[in-house]
Amino acid sequence: MKPESALKRFTAFLREKGLRLTQPRSDILMMAWSTHDHFTADQMVAWLTEMDGKASRATVYRTLSLLVEGGFLSSMDNGQGTLLYEHILGHAHHDHMVCLGCSRIIEFRSEEIESLQEELAARHQFQLVDHTLRLEGYCASCQRQRNDA
């Protein structure tokens, strides 16, 4: 989804909540859409500071929460207590493998896993709405380092 389209939808989402689109909120959404990497709130603060954005740390945290609530971003714990964000609106669902050594994130999609989840939900008469799958382990590089130690 193009950033301009996301901004229109975000404006409508904010209006429904009785909020307005401020310049800092707009800057945060546009910055989130400018990267395809996972990022932290602190990285967002740094990016905005670099571009002379006027968003406070509190505004960044509140806006990221709004973007997650509205389905614009997803958040995920990196396994070390830090929340990572990525924009998801207009992107296909995917899952993650997180390296416990270097925090590298590998995105993947498996039709077999998706089918199995749907089958299990049906078997338990459970209406599946959404899911998050995060596999934790060690990437090939970290495995080599652990074996060499």
Image (spheres, rainbow, N blue to C red):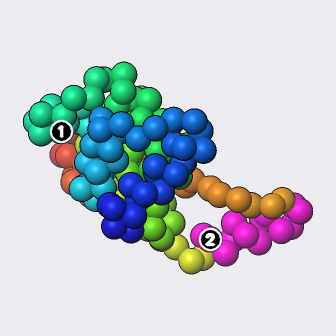
Query: Label 1 belongs to which residue?
Result: 47
x, y percent for residue 65: 48, 36
- Stretch in magenta: 113-125
Nearer to the camera, 83 or 49:
49
Amino acid carrying mark 1 in the image? Trp
In the image, is residue 98 part of the stretch drawn in magenta?
no
C-beta proximity under 8 Å, tags 1 and 2 = no
Residue 115 has which mark?
A: none
x, y percent for residue 27: 27, 43
Task: Indicate the quadrant where residue 54 lies.
Answer: top left
- Relative to 125, say whether 16 is above or below: above
Nearer to the camera, 21 or 63:
21
The reply to whether residue 126 is visible in this rendering is yes
x, y percent for residue 128: 74, 61
Calculate the distance from the C-alpha at mark 1 to the C-alpha at mark 2: 35 Å
**First along the sequence among labels 1 and 2:** 1
Q: Residue at x 38, y 45 (%)?
A: 85
Q: Quadrant of the N terminus?
A: bottom left
